[in-house]
Image (spheres, rainbow, N blue to C red):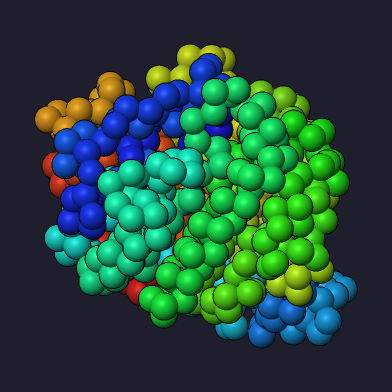
Protein backbone atom coordinates (compact mmCIF):
# COMPACT_ATOMS: atom_id res chain seq x y z
CA UNK A 1 0.00 0.00 0.00
CA UNK A 2 1.48 3.31 -0.99
CA UNK A 3 -0.29 4.83 1.97
CA UNK A 4 -3.84 5.25 3.20
CA UNK A 5 -4.45 8.33 1.08
CA UNK A 6 -4.86 6.23 -2.03
CA UNK A 7 -6.85 3.05 -2.21
CA UNK A 8 -4.93 -0.16 -2.70
CA UNK A 9 -6.36 -3.43 -3.90
CA UNK A 10 -5.11 -6.62 -2.35
CA UNK A 11 -6.23 -10.19 -2.44
CA UNK A 12 -6.75 -12.48 0.46
CA UNK A 13 -4.31 -15.37 0.44
CA UNK A 14 -5.31 -18.89 1.40
CA UNK A 15 -4.53 -21.20 -1.41
CA UNK A 16 -6.51 -24.37 -1.78
CA UNK A 17 -3.29 -26.30 -1.97
CA UNK A 18 -2.36 -24.94 1.43
CA UNK A 19 -5.55 -25.62 3.30
CA UNK A 20 -7.80 -23.88 0.88
CA UNK A 21 -10.67 -21.46 0.98
CA UNK A 22 -12.66 -19.27 -1.30
CA UNK A 23 -11.98 -15.56 -1.11
CA UNK A 24 -14.60 -13.48 0.58
CA UNK A 25 -15.23 -9.81 0.01
CA UNK A 26 -13.79 -7.50 2.58
CA UNK A 27 -14.29 -3.83 3.16
CA UNK A 28 -12.30 -0.80 2.26
CA UNK A 29 -11.32 1.73 4.86
CA UNK A 30 -13.04 4.66 3.24
CA UNK A 31 -11.34 7.42 1.34
CA UNK A 32 -8.18 6.95 3.32
CA UNK A 33 -7.39 3.85 1.33
CA UNK A 34 -7.10 0.48 2.93
CA UNK A 35 -7.35 -3.10 1.84
CA UNK A 36 -10.18 -4.55 -0.20
CA UNK A 37 -10.36 -8.30 -0.16
CA UNK A 38 -11.26 -9.58 -3.59
CA UNK A 39 -10.70 -13.27 -3.02
CA UNK A 40 -12.45 -15.60 -5.42
CA UNK A 41 -13.31 -19.23 -5.65
CA UNK A 42 -10.34 -21.44 -5.13
CA UNK A 43 -8.22 -18.42 -4.30
CA UNK A 44 -5.59 -18.49 -1.68
CA UNK A 45 -6.45 -17.45 1.80
CA UNK A 46 -4.80 -14.19 2.51
CA UNK A 47 -3.26 -11.52 0.31
CA UNK A 48 -4.76 -10.45 1.69
CA UNK A 49 25.70 -2.22 0.12
CA UNK A 50 26.67 -1.32 2.33
CA UNK A 51 26.00 2.02 3.79
CA UNK A 52 27.14 3.97 0.85
CA UNK A 53 27.92 7.07 2.57
CA UNK A 54 31.09 6.28 4.28
CA UNK A 55 30.34 2.87 5.66
CA UNK A 56 28.62 4.31 8.72
CA UNK A 57 28.35 1.63 11.36
CA UNK A 58 25.23 0.04 12.60
CA UNK A 59 24.26 1.43 15.93
CA UNK A 60 24.07 -1.55 18.23
CA UNK A 61 26.71 -3.77 16.82
CA UNK A 62 25.93 -4.72 13.21
CA UNK A 63 29.52 -4.22 12.15
CA UNK A 64 30.89 -2.88 8.93
CA UNK A 65 34.00 -4.55 7.76
CA UNK A 66 34.92 -1.96 5.24
CA UNK A 67 33.85 1.03 3.26
CA UNK A 68 32.67 1.22 -0.31
CA UNK A 69 34.53 2.30 -3.41
CA UNK A 70 32.62 4.76 -5.55
CA UNK A 71 33.24 5.16 -9.22
CA UNK A 72 35.58 8.00 -9.80
CA UNK A 73 35.82 8.37 -6.07
CA UNK A 74 37.76 7.04 -3.16
CA UNK A 75 37.09 4.59 -0.42
CA UNK A 76 34.86 5.94 2.28
CA UNK A 77 36.68 6.67 5.44
CA UNK A 78 35.33 5.23 8.62
CA UNK A 79 33.47 1.97 8.36
CA UNK A 80 35.18 0.24 11.25
CA UNK A 81 33.20 -2.32 13.25
CA UNK A 82 30.84 -0.84 15.77
CA UNK A 83 31.83 -1.64 19.29
CA UNK A 84 29.05 -1.06 21.74
CA UNK A 85 26.93 0.61 19.14
CA UNK A 86 28.59 4.02 18.74
CA UNK A 87 29.23 5.05 15.15
CA UNK A 88 32.73 6.26 14.27
CA UNK A 89 33.49 9.82 13.43
CA UNK A 90 34.27 10.67 9.87
CA UNK A 91 33.27 8.85 6.74
CA UNK A 92 29.80 10.27 6.43
CA UNK A 93 29.97 10.65 2.66
CA UNK A 94 31.88 8.79 0.01
CA UNK A 95 33.47 10.95 -2.67
CA UNK A 96 31.03 11.20 -5.53
CA UNK A 97 27.91 11.52 -3.39
CA UNK A 98 24.63 9.71 -3.46
CA UNK A 99 24.11 9.91 -7.21
CA UNK A 100 27.70 9.21 -8.12
CA UNK A 101 27.01 5.51 -7.96
CA UNK A 102 29.41 2.64 -7.71
CA UNK A 103 30.42 -0.04 -10.12
CA UNK A 104 31.87 -2.24 -7.47
CA UNK A 105 30.52 -3.55 -4.22
CA UNK A 106 31.31 -3.22 -0.59
CA UNK A 107 34.07 -5.35 0.79
CA UNK A 108 32.25 -6.41 3.88
CA UNK A 109 28.57 -5.63 3.95
CA UNK A 110 27.88 -2.49 5.92
CA UNK A 111 24.47 -1.09 6.64
CA UNK A 112 22.69 -2.86 3.79
CA UNK A 113 23.33 -6.35 5.14
CA UNK A 114 20.89 -8.33 7.26
CA UNK A 115 22.43 -11.22 9.23
CA UNK A 116 19.76 -13.83 8.40
CA UNK A 117 19.78 -13.09 4.65
CA UNK A 118 22.18 -13.59 1.70
CA UNK A 119 24.80 -10.89 1.22
CA UNK A 120 23.59 -9.39 -2.03
CA UNK A 121 20.75 -7.08 -3.02
CA UNK A 122 17.71 -9.35 -3.00
CA UNK A 123 15.03 -9.26 -5.69
CA UNK A 124 11.61 -10.68 -5.00
CA UNK A 125 8.14 -10.56 -6.40
CA UNK A 126 4.70 -10.53 -4.81
CA UNK A 127 2.49 -13.56 -5.41
CA UNK A 128 -1.27 -13.47 -5.03
CA UNK A 129 -1.08 -16.83 -3.30
CA UNK A 130 1.71 -18.80 -1.69
CA UNK A 131 1.46 -21.60 -4.25
CA UNK A 132 1.57 -19.29 -7.28
CA UNK A 133 4.06 -20.83 -9.73
CA UNK A 134 4.73 -17.86 -12.03
CA UNK A 135 8.16 -17.10 -10.58
CA UNK A 136 9.05 -20.78 -10.32
CA UNK A 137 8.22 -21.32 -13.99
CA UNK A 138 9.76 -18.06 -15.19
CA UNK A 139 13.29 -19.45 -15.35
CA UNK A 140 14.61 -16.56 -13.26
CA UNK A 141 16.26 -17.25 -9.91
CA UNK A 142 14.47 -14.67 -7.83
CA UNK A 143 15.48 -14.48 -4.20
CA UNK A 144 12.10 -14.00 -2.52
CA UNK A 145 8.45 -14.82 -3.15
CA UNK A 146 6.32 -12.75 -0.81
CA UNK A 147 2.65 -12.32 -0.11
CA UNK A 148 0.22 -10.46 2.11
CA UNK A 149 -1.24 -12.18 5.16
CA UNK A 150 -4.22 -9.96 5.86
CA UNK A 151 -7.12 -10.24 8.23
CA UNK A 152 -8.10 -9.88 11.85
CA UNK A 153 -8.12 -12.37 14.69
CA UNK A 154 -10.61 -15.14 13.94
CA UNK A 155 -10.35 -14.65 10.18
CA UNK A 156 -6.71 -14.63 9.17
CA UNK A 157 -3.72 -16.89 8.57
CA UNK A 158 -3.95 -18.31 12.09
CA UNK A 159 -7.12 -20.29 11.30
CA UNK A 160 -6.78 -20.39 7.50
CA UNK A 161 -9.28 -17.55 7.19
CA UNK A 162 -11.97 -19.51 9.00
CA UNK A 163 -11.44 -22.69 6.99
CA UNK A 164 -8.99 -24.46 9.27
CA UNK A 165 -7.92 -25.13 12.81
CA UNK A 166 -6.88 -22.09 14.84
CA UNK A 167 -3.32 -23.27 15.43
CA UNK A 168 -1.30 -21.51 12.73
CA UNK A 169 -0.71 -24.73 10.81
CA UNK A 170 -1.59 -23.03 7.51
CA UNK A 171 1.75 -21.25 7.75
CA UNK A 172 3.66 -24.55 7.62
CA UNK A 173 2.33 -25.21 4.13
CA UNK A 174 3.06 -21.68 2.96
CA UNK A 175 6.68 -21.77 4.09
CA UNK A 176 7.46 -25.20 2.67
CA UNK A 177 5.70 -24.45 -0.62
CA UNK A 178 7.67 -21.28 -1.33
CA UNK A 179 10.88 -22.93 -0.14
CA UNK A 180 10.19 -25.81 -2.51
CA UNK A 181 10.09 -23.34 -5.38
CA UNK A 182 13.59 -22.23 -4.43
CA UNK A 183 12.72 -18.87 -2.87
CA UNK A 184 12.98 -17.24 0.53
CA UNK A 185 9.44 -16.87 1.90
CA UNK A 186 8.40 -13.28 2.45
CA UNK A 187 5.42 -12.18 4.54
CA UNK A 188 3.75 -8.82 4.73
CA UNK A 189 1.83 -9.19 7.97
CA UNK A 190 -1.19 -6.89 7.76
CA UNK A 191 -3.50 -7.77 10.63
CA UNK A 192 -3.63 -4.73 12.89
CA UNK A 193 -4.39 -2.45 9.97
CA UNK A 194 -7.06 -4.52 8.27
CA UNK A 195 -10.75 -3.78 8.02
CA UNK A 196 -11.46 -1.16 10.66
CA UNK A 197 -15.03 0.00 11.14
CA UNK A 198 -13.56 3.18 12.60
CA UNK A 199 -11.20 3.82 9.71
CA UNK A 200 -7.61 4.70 10.47
CA UNK A 201 -8.46 6.09 13.91
CA UNK A 202 -9.31 2.53 14.92
CA UNK A 203 -5.64 1.58 14.86
CA UNK A 204 -4.84 3.36 18.09
CA UNK A 205 -8.06 2.19 19.75
CA UNK A 206 -7.18 -1.35 18.74
CA UNK A 207 -3.71 -1.49 20.26
CA UNK A 208 -5.05 0.08 23.46
CA UNK A 209 -7.39 -2.89 23.90
CA UNK A 210 -5.71 -5.58 26.02
CA UNK A 211 -7.95 -8.36 24.69
CA UNK A 212 -7.15 -7.54 21.08
CA UNK A 213 -3.42 -7.14 21.73
CA UNK A 214 -3.24 -10.39 23.68
CA UNK A 215 -4.74 -12.32 20.79
CA UNK A 216 -2.49 -10.56 18.28
CA UNK A 217 0.74 -11.43 20.08
CA UNK A 218 -0.45 -14.92 20.98
CA UNK A 219 -0.79 -15.53 17.24
CA UNK A 220 2.49 -13.79 16.50
CA UNK A 221 4.28 -16.10 18.95
CA UNK A 222 2.95 -19.08 17.02
CA UNK A 223 4.24 -17.48 13.82
CA UNK A 224 7.68 -17.24 15.42
CA UNK A 225 7.52 -20.89 16.51
CA UNK A 226 6.52 -22.02 13.03
CA UNK A 227 9.37 -20.05 11.44
CA UNK A 228 11.85 -21.41 13.97
CA UNK A 229 10.77 -24.95 13.12
CA UNK A 230 11.05 -24.14 9.41
CA UNK A 231 14.71 -23.38 10.04
CA UNK A 232 15.44 -21.32 6.92
CA UNK A 233 15.40 -17.54 6.34
CA UNK A 234 12.05 -15.77 6.33
CA UNK A 235 11.35 -12.04 5.86
CA UNK A 236 8.48 -10.31 7.68
CA UNK A 237 7.46 -6.75 6.83
CA UNK A 238 5.29 -5.58 9.70
CA UNK A 239 1.98 -3.85 9.22
CA UNK A 240 2.29 -1.57 6.22
CA UNK A 241 1.05 1.96 6.88
CA UNK A 242 -0.18 1.04 10.36
CA UNK A 243 2.85 2.27 12.29
CA UNK A 244 2.91 5.48 10.27
CA UNK A 245 -0.75 6.08 10.99
CA UNK A 246 -0.20 5.43 14.71
CA UNK A 247 2.73 7.85 14.55
CA UNK A 248 0.38 10.54 13.27
CA UNK A 249 -2.50 9.61 15.57
CA UNK A 250 -0.21 10.02 18.57
CA UNK A 251 1.39 13.22 17.27
CA UNK A 252 4.71 11.37 17.15
CA UNK A 253 4.56 10.44 20.84
CA UNK A 254 5.67 6.82 21.35
CA UNK A 255 4.83 7.03 25.06
CA UNK A 256 1.12 7.20 24.24
CA UNK A 257 -0.80 4.50 26.12
CA UNK A 258 -1.18 1.03 24.61
CA UNK A 259 -1.93 -2.41 26.05
CA UNK A 260 1.26 -4.45 26.32
CA UNK A 261 2.19 -5.73 29.79
CA UNK A 262 -1.48 -5.45 30.67
CA UNK A 263 -2.22 -8.31 28.25
CA UNK A 264 -0.95 -10.70 30.90
CA UNK A 265 1.32 -12.46 28.42
CA UNK A 266 4.47 -13.43 30.35
CA UNK A 267 6.77 -12.56 27.44
CA UNK A 268 5.52 -8.96 27.56
CA UNK A 269 5.43 -8.55 31.32
CA UNK A 270 8.39 -6.19 31.55
CA UNK A 271 7.39 -3.89 28.71
CA UNK A 272 5.72 -0.51 29.14
CA UNK A 273 2.03 -0.10 28.32
CA UNK A 274 2.85 2.34 25.55
CA UNK A 275 3.03 2.45 21.78
CA UNK A 276 6.80 2.02 22.14
CA UNK A 277 6.13 -1.10 24.20
CA UNK A 278 3.83 -2.39 21.47
CA UNK A 279 6.68 -2.15 18.97
CA UNK A 280 9.11 -3.83 21.34
CA UNK A 281 6.60 -6.66 21.91
CA UNK A 282 7.48 -8.11 18.47
CA UNK A 283 11.10 -8.28 19.56
CA UNK A 284 10.25 -9.73 22.95
CA UNK A 285 8.25 -12.53 21.34
CA UNK A 286 11.01 -13.29 18.84
CA UNK A 287 13.56 -13.36 21.64
CA UNK A 288 11.43 -15.59 23.84
CA UNK A 289 11.07 -18.16 21.06
CA UNK A 290 14.65 -17.77 19.82
CA UNK A 291 14.29 -17.37 16.06
CA UNK A 292 17.63 -16.56 14.39
CA UNK A 293 16.30 -17.24 10.90
CA UNK A 294 13.70 -14.48 10.71
CA UNK A 295 14.41 -10.93 9.56
CA UNK A 296 11.69 -8.46 10.41
CA UNK A 297 11.09 -4.74 10.46
CA UNK A 298 8.30 -2.16 10.48
CA UNK A 299 6.96 -0.27 7.51
CA UNK A 300 8.19 3.31 7.85
CA UNK A 301 6.13 5.52 5.55
CA UNK A 302 7.57 8.81 4.40
CA UNK A 303 4.16 10.46 4.55
CA UNK A 304 4.44 10.42 8.35
CA UNK A 305 7.80 12.20 8.48
CA UNK A 306 6.35 15.50 9.74
CA UNK A 307 4.71 16.07 6.38
CA UNK A 308 4.34 13.92 3.30
CA UNK A 309 7.88 14.58 2.16
CA UNK A 310 7.56 12.86 -1.23
CA UNK A 311 4.13 14.04 -2.34
CA UNK A 312 2.49 17.17 -0.99
CA UNK A 313 4.25 19.06 1.73
CA UNK A 314 6.69 20.30 2.74
CA UNK A 315 8.20 21.76 -0.39
CA UNK A 316 10.54 19.52 -2.35
CA UNK A 317 13.20 22.14 -1.80
CA UNK A 318 13.18 21.57 1.95
CA UNK A 319 16.11 19.68 3.49
CA UNK A 320 15.32 16.15 4.58
CA UNK A 321 17.41 15.59 7.71
CA UNK A 322 14.99 17.29 10.11
CA UNK A 323 12.20 15.05 8.80
CA UNK A 324 14.40 12.00 9.22
CA UNK A 325 15.14 13.02 12.81
CA UNK A 326 11.44 13.56 13.50
CA UNK A 327 10.49 10.09 12.29
CA UNK A 328 13.48 8.41 13.87
CA UNK A 329 12.47 9.76 17.28
CA UNK A 330 9.32 7.61 16.98
CA UNK A 331 10.66 4.43 15.40
CA UNK A 332 13.80 4.46 17.52
CA UNK A 333 11.58 4.05 20.59
CA UNK A 334 9.56 1.23 18.98
CA UNK A 335 12.59 -1.03 18.73
CA UNK A 336 14.44 -0.01 15.59
CA UNK A 337 16.95 1.52 17.96
CA UNK A 338 18.54 0.12 21.10
CA UNK A 339 15.87 -0.82 23.62
CA UNK A 340 15.20 -2.77 26.78
CA UNK A 341 14.60 -6.11 25.02
CA UNK A 342 18.26 -6.30 24.04
CA UNK A 343 17.13 -6.94 20.46
CA UNK A 344 16.45 -4.66 17.51
CA UNK A 345 14.47 -4.80 14.32
CA UNK A 346 16.63 -5.98 11.43
CA UNK A 347 15.48 -3.42 8.89
CA UNK A 348 13.09 -0.62 8.14
CA UNK A 349 10.65 -1.10 5.26
CA UNK A 350 9.59 1.47 2.70
CA UNK A 351 7.01 1.39 -0.06
CA UNK A 352 8.20 3.50 -3.02
CA UNK A 353 5.60 5.73 -4.57
CA UNK A 354 4.23 4.76 -7.94
CA UNK A 355 5.81 7.94 -9.14
CA UNK A 356 5.06 8.21 -12.83
CA UNK A 357 1.47 7.04 -13.06
CA UNK A 358 -0.67 9.13 -15.36
CA UNK A 359 -3.61 7.72 -13.40
CA UNK A 360 -2.76 10.18 -10.64
CA UNK A 361 -4.36 13.51 -11.45
CA UNK A 362 -4.15 15.16 -8.05
CA UNK A 363 -1.47 17.67 -8.93
CA UNK A 364 1.52 15.80 -7.55
CA UNK A 365 4.79 16.31 -9.37
CA UNK A 366 6.15 13.35 -11.27
CA UNK A 367 9.49 12.04 -10.08
CA UNK A 368 12.44 12.62 -12.38
CA UNK A 369 14.71 9.65 -13.05
CA UNK A 370 17.59 11.87 -14.18
CA UNK A 371 20.96 11.11 -12.64
CA UNK A 372 21.59 14.83 -12.29
CA UNK A 373 18.27 15.70 -10.62
CA UNK A 374 18.68 17.62 -7.40
CA UNK A 375 17.78 15.92 -4.13
CA UNK A 376 15.70 19.05 -3.55
CA UNK A 377 13.41 18.27 -6.44
CA UNK A 378 10.76 15.60 -7.12
CA UNK A 379 13.02 12.75 -8.16
CA UNK A 380 14.31 9.28 -7.53
CA UNK A 381 17.42 10.99 -6.21
CA UNK A 382 15.37 12.70 -3.49
CA UNK A 383 13.84 9.38 -2.44
CA UNK A 384 17.28 7.76 -2.36
CA UNK A 385 18.59 10.64 -0.29
CA UNK A 386 15.82 10.16 2.28
CA UNK A 387 16.65 6.45 2.43
CA UNK A 388 20.34 7.25 2.82
CA UNK A 389 19.88 9.79 5.59
CA UNK A 390 17.50 7.55 7.51
CA UNK A 391 19.83 4.57 7.10
CA UNK A 392 22.72 6.65 8.34
CA UNK A 393 20.70 7.85 11.33
CA UNK A 394 19.15 4.50 12.27
CA UNK A 395 22.03 2.19 11.45
CA UNK A 396 19.69 -0.48 10.02
CA UNK A 397 19.11 -1.42 6.36
CA UNK A 398 16.04 -0.93 4.21
CA UNK A 399 13.81 -3.45 2.53
CA UNK A 400 11.68 -1.85 -0.18
CA UNK A 401 8.35 -3.61 -0.60
CA UNK A 402 5.43 -3.23 -2.96
CA UNK A 403 7.85 -1.78 -5.51
CA UNK A 404 6.04 -0.84 -8.76
CA UNK A 405 6.88 -2.81 -11.89
CA UNK A 406 5.21 -0.65 -14.53
CA UNK A 407 7.38 0.42 -17.48
CA UNK A 408 7.10 3.09 -20.16
CA UNK A 409 5.40 0.73 -22.62
CA UNK A 410 2.28 0.26 -20.52
CA UNK A 411 -1.02 1.56 -21.85
CA UNK A 412 -1.99 3.60 -18.78
CA UNK A 413 -5.19 1.66 -18.44
CA UNK A 414 -6.51 -0.48 -15.63
CA UNK A 415 -4.80 -3.85 -15.46
CA UNK A 416 -6.52 -6.71 -17.27
CA UNK A 417 -5.06 -10.19 -17.42
CA UNK A 418 -6.25 -10.48 -21.01
CA UNK A 419 -4.73 -7.25 -22.32
CA UNK A 420 -1.00 -7.01 -22.90
CA UNK A 421 0.62 -3.88 -21.48
CA UNK A 422 -2.48 -2.96 -19.51
CA UNK A 423 -1.60 -1.22 -16.28
CA UNK A 424 0.12 2.07 -15.55
CA UNK A 425 3.51 3.41 -16.49
CA UNK A 426 6.24 3.90 -13.98
CA UNK A 427 9.95 4.66 -13.98
CA UNK A 428 11.62 2.74 -11.19
CA UNK A 429 11.93 -0.71 -12.74
CA UNK A 430 13.57 0.78 -15.86
CA UNK A 431 15.86 2.94 -13.72
CA UNK A 432 17.06 -0.17 -11.92
CA UNK A 433 17.22 -2.82 -14.63
CA UNK A 434 17.25 -1.41 -18.15
CA UNK A 435 20.51 -2.34 -19.86
CA UNK A 436 19.99 -1.56 -23.56
CA UNK A 437 20.37 1.85 -25.25
CA UNK A 438 19.99 4.53 -24.03
CA UNK A 439 20.92 2.76 -20.79
CA UNK A 440 23.76 0.26 -20.29
CA UNK A 441 24.80 -2.54 -17.97
CA UNK A 442 27.20 -0.13 -16.24
CA UNK A 443 24.41 2.38 -15.65
CA UNK A 444 22.16 -0.40 -14.39
CA UNK A 445 24.81 -1.35 -11.84
CA UNK A 446 25.25 2.28 -10.84
CA UNK A 447 21.53 2.75 -10.29
CA UNK A 448 21.15 -0.38 -8.19
CA UNK A 449 24.28 0.74 -6.36
CA UNK A 450 22.71 4.12 -5.57
CA UNK A 451 20.03 2.30 -3.59
CA UNK A 452 22.45 -0.18 -2.06
CA UNK A 453 24.64 2.68 -0.88
CA UNK A 454 21.56 4.16 0.77
CA UNK A 455 21.20 0.94 2.76
CA UNK A 456 18.71 -0.95 0.57
CA UNK A 457 19.07 -4.71 1.01
CA UNK A 458 16.09 -5.88 -1.06
CA UNK A 459 13.55 -4.89 -3.70
CA UNK A 460 10.27 -6.78 -3.26
CA UNK A 461 8.19 -6.01 -6.34
CA UNK A 462 4.45 -6.27 -6.81
CA UNK A 463 1.12 -5.15 -5.34
CA UNK A 464 1.85 -1.53 -6.16
CA UNK A 465 -0.81 1.07 -6.89
CA UNK A 466 0.06 0.73 -10.57
CA UNK A 467 -1.81 -2.58 -10.61
CA UNK A 468 0.69 -4.16 -12.97
CA UNK A 469 1.71 -7.80 -13.01
CA UNK A 470 4.94 -9.30 -14.38
CA UNK A 471 3.02 -11.55 -16.78
CA UNK A 472 1.75 -8.50 -18.61
CA UNK A 473 4.57 -5.94 -18.70
CA UNK A 474 5.73 -6.39 -22.28
CA UNK A 475 8.76 -4.38 -23.33
CA UNK A 476 9.71 -3.08 -26.77
CA UNK A 477 10.76 -6.59 -27.80
CA UNK A 478 7.37 -8.00 -26.76
CA UNK A 479 8.99 -9.91 -23.92
CA UNK A 480 8.10 -9.37 -20.25
CA UNK A 481 10.41 -6.61 -19.05
CA UNK A 482 10.42 -7.63 -15.41
CA UNK A 483 11.40 -11.21 -16.07
CA UNK A 484 13.91 -10.70 -18.89
CA UNK A 485 15.70 -7.70 -17.41
CA UNK A 486 15.78 -8.95 -13.85
CA UNK A 487 17.02 -12.30 -15.16
CA UNK A 488 19.86 -10.52 -16.94
CA UNK A 489 20.75 -8.64 -13.75
CA UNK A 490 20.80 -11.84 -11.68
CA UNK A 491 22.76 -13.77 -14.31
CA UNK A 492 25.32 -10.98 -14.37
CA UNK A 493 25.98 -11.54 -10.68
CA UNK A 494 23.46 -9.18 -9.11
CA UNK A 495 24.80 -6.65 -6.65
CA UNK A 496 26.90 -8.04 -3.78
CA UNK A 497 26.83 -6.34 -0.40
**Can residue 294 be seen in this snapshot?**
yes
Q: Position of residue 253 (x, y in %)?
A: 84, 41
Q: Position of residue 120 (x, y in %)?
A: 46, 73
Q: Is residue 414 left or right of residue 295?
A: left
Q: Of residues 213 and 231, which is closer to you in this image?
A: 213
The image quadrant of residue 10 is: top left
Residue visible at 40% across and 60% down?
167
106 vs 130: above or below = below
Q: Is residue 36 left or right of residue 140?
A: right
**Can residue 397 be seen in this snapshot?**
no
Residue visible at 41% across and 78% down?
229
Q: Of residues 135 and 376, which is closer to you in this image?
A: 135
Q: Is residue 58 left or right of residue 187?
A: right
Residue visible at 69% across and 33% down?
205
256 vs 135: above or below = above
Q: Position of residue 69 (x, y in %)?
A: 61, 75
Q: Of residues 485 and 232, which is closer to you in this image?
A: 232
The image quadrant of residue 316 is: top right
Amino acid sequence: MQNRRWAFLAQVVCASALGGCSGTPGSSQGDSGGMIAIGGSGGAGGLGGSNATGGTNVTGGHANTGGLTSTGGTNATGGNPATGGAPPTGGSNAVGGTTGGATGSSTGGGNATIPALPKHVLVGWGAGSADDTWAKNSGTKYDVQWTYLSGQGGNNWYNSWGYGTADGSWLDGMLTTIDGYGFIPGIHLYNMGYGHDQGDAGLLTEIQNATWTKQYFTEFKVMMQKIKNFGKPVIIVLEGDSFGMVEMLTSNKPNTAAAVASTGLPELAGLPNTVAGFGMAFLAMRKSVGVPNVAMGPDTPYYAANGDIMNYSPSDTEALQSHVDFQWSFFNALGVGTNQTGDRFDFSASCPRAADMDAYSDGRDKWSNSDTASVNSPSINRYVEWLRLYNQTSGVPWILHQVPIGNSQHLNTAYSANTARSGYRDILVEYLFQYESPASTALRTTHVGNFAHAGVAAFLFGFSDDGDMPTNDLWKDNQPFFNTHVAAFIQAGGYPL
